[in-house]
Amino acid sequence: HQILFPIPDIDRTDLFICIGANPMASNGSLMTVPDFRGRLKALKGRGGRMVVVDPRRTETGKLADEFHFIRPGTDALLLMAMVHTLFEENLVNLGHAEQWTKDVDLVRLAALGFTPEAVSENTGMPAADIRNLARQLATTPRAALYTRMGTSTQAFGGVATWLAYVLNILTGKLDSTGGMMFTQPAIDLIALGGMSGQKGHFGKRFSRVKKLPEFAGEYPSSTIADEILTPGEGQIRAFVTVAGNPVLSSPNGGRLDEAFTGLDFMVSVDYYLNETTRHADVILPPTAGLERSHYDLIFSMFAVRNTAKYSPALFDAGKDTRHDWQILLELAHRLEKKRKGGRLPLRSEMGWRAFKQIGPDPILDLMLRAGPYGTNIGPARGLVQPAIDLVMDILPERHPLRGLAKMSPLNRHWQDLPKGLSISALKELPNGVDLGPLRPCMPGRLFTRDGKVNLAPRRYLQDLGRLHALLAAPPSDDLLLIGRRHVRSNNSWMHNSQRLVKGKDRCTLMIHPKDVARCGLQAGDSAEIGSTSGQIVLPVEITEDVMPGVVSVPHGWGHHREGTGQSVAVAHAGASINDVLSDQEIDPLVGTSVLNGQTVSVKVWRADRQRKQA
Ligand SMILES: Nc1nc2c(c(=O)[nH]1)N[C@H]1C(S)=C(S)[C@@H](COP(=O)(O)OP(=O)(O)OC[C@H]3O[C@@H](n4cnc5c(=O)[nH]c(N)nc54)[C@H](O)[C@@H]3O)O[C@H]1N2
Ligand SMILES: Nc1nc2c(c(=O)[nH]1)N[C@H]1C(S)=C(S)[C@@H](COP(=O)(O)OP(=O)(O)OC[C@H]3O[C@@H](n4cnc5c(=O)[nH]c(N)nc54)[C@H](O)[C@@H]3O)O[C@H]1N2
Ligand SMILES: [Mo]
């Protein structure tokens, strides 16, 4: 399920193995972790350790007790070799996961060929270090192995992500204190969705052009351009973007940029006139963050501690402005009317109007009250039930909110709140409420038919042929491109704030001194980074913090395109890594873009030569 996965119990772990993530810059990812630095300090204070594995010695890597470079795209080999070591050295111990895990033996067989010695050359990690890492994970009772962007958005992302779960399960870390645990948020979208029959799915449909699998109803963004540019039945002719800037965030953004120009119609719901919204026929700007109330439904599912916080709007919304929810609801209503030939049945029309009238807060209130820390909603329910019925009428069959209709009033009181959670209770607690640390909850979180975790799904096993091929091929000495994030940036949209972009140029090509010479570069040069998809030019930043053979460029830059309305961003344009990354390179198992580990060429860029070409 797209929003159900275990989170590192960072506040109680004694060993945090962090592979392909940089929480010092990102504040976590599928781990919502405010003040990572403070929590890391506490971890070290209680004698704990952090190990980081990354092709770049990141801000997080610099604070690690143990740091290892790894060649981009080879994590699946490292993780397989760790699995191999666990079996070989009799370190497998599932703990209470034993009861609800099956096919452990298939995993043992799958790992047979992947000895630490065999994967060492490809990964660039000494065999002894790999064995040691597996042993540490197995023998530290409270340990968590966490992988993220670097291990998932790469050629073996699917297998690497699977193996990270496998390692946590084989060593008894899943669902145990200080290990990898599921959250119990005040609004449990999984429980709500489960009640509406929504159980998560993958590969139920395939995209038209490239036949890529859907996941939770979404297709990979790398194939948007194909769907717009390829003629035929089902070709996309109109496009809506909401809070996204895919021209900068999708691989081969240049192709997407072109594709958008050919659309019949485009709408963007966004504040900014940026690289993507400049193609829109209509831009609908929503109210700003401080003009609307806020409760975090999604990130509470991933938080390292269960908390609930409601933020009321600080400012009145301007006259004639709309919240995102109002814009989207209005668009949906009008489209639905159009689809039905201009008129809706009375009951359905009333449902739409009821939804617009009540807005999200009463629904939020109901979800809080009906949730695991909620109050008994008894009489209140009687009052709102008719409105709920009307709203339910217009929701698609499998919409998670449908779970609400089936939720029986609960009577579990939260300890500090005699009346349990509700919006009014949260309004009295402006700093939010602490609902305590993560708690074991398996097998309650399992939705599989047999109530078991299948440790070796066929889909993953079938992808191992590719991993064997990687192992058999000697590593090439081409330069491999990886991304990076910075604490003062957020993907593509923080670059129009002077405060956030001032100071040293951050959109640079990081390159190791050993590679500088072979590319004919010197400090102070600009480099041309090229691939079959395109070229960009960036200043070089020579540093031993990247692994030899690896270069790094951040994403979200490239604000030189005409027709955007962001003067500060234009003055700090940088270049887009996604103009170099190919949209043809995907992980065939899951369809995810290869954002890390694509091959590039790097050479000196000279203004004079460029002028001659022009
Ligand atoms: N300040 C800030 N915070 C953010 C964001 C932001 O842009 N700025 N973005 C937000 C979003 S949308 C997300 S998804 C999260 C992401 O949060 P994280 O998952 O922490 O993502 P990154 O910071 O990109 O870290 C990925 C790391 O993987 C490394 N890496 C690259 N290739 C490989 C590889 O092949 N193997 C291994 N082992 N490592 C590799 C990179 O060097 C990098 O250190 O952050 C969120 N938070
Ligand atoms: N090469 C490479 N590419 C990457 C990544 C990488 O690591 N490397 N990371 C990928 C990841 S993990 C992600 S999540 C994507 C992110 O990429 P996108 O999903 O395209 O998102 P952003 O660049 O963050 O753009 C957010 C947009 O939302 C607008 N916005 C902000 N707040 C609101 C709001 O309240 N309402 C509305 N309607 N609009 C709002 C902003 O103005 C901005 O235009 O990039 C991906 N692209
Ligand atoms: Mo993301």
Image (cartoon, rainbow, N blue to C red):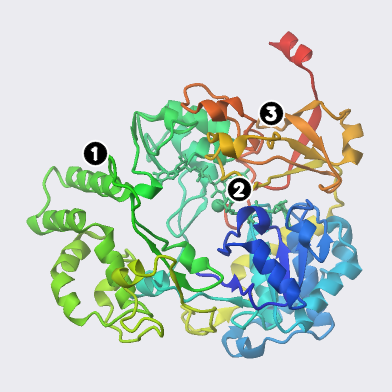
Q: What's the CA distance linking mark 2 and mark 3?
A: 19 Å
- Check disc 3 and report the residue beneath it: 536
Disc 2 residue crowd, few under 14, some 14–19, many 20+, Cα 10 Å? many
Q: Please, what is the three-letter code of the amino acid marked with disc 2?
A: Ser
Name the residue rendered at 87%, 52% in the picture: 474
| Mark 2–mark 1 distance (CA, rounded to whole Å) | 42 Å
Numbered disc in front, either 1 or 3 = 1
Give the residue type at disc 1.
Answer: Lys
Residue displayed at 47% across by 66% down = 300
Mark 3: secondary structure: strand
The three-letter amino acid code for the residue at tag 3 is Ile
Secondary-structure class at tag 2: loop
Secondary element type, mark 1: loop
Q: Within 10 angstroms of label 1, few (less than 14), some, or many (20 or more) residues?
A: few
Residue under numbered circle 2: 593
Query: Is residue 289 visible in this depiction of the protein?
Result: yes
Tell me: residue 265, above or below residue 439. Answer: above
Label 1 and label 3: CA atoms lie apart by 43 Å
The label on residue 319 is: 1
Q: Identify the disc placed on residue 197.
A: none
Mark positioned earlier in the residue sequence (1 or 3): 1
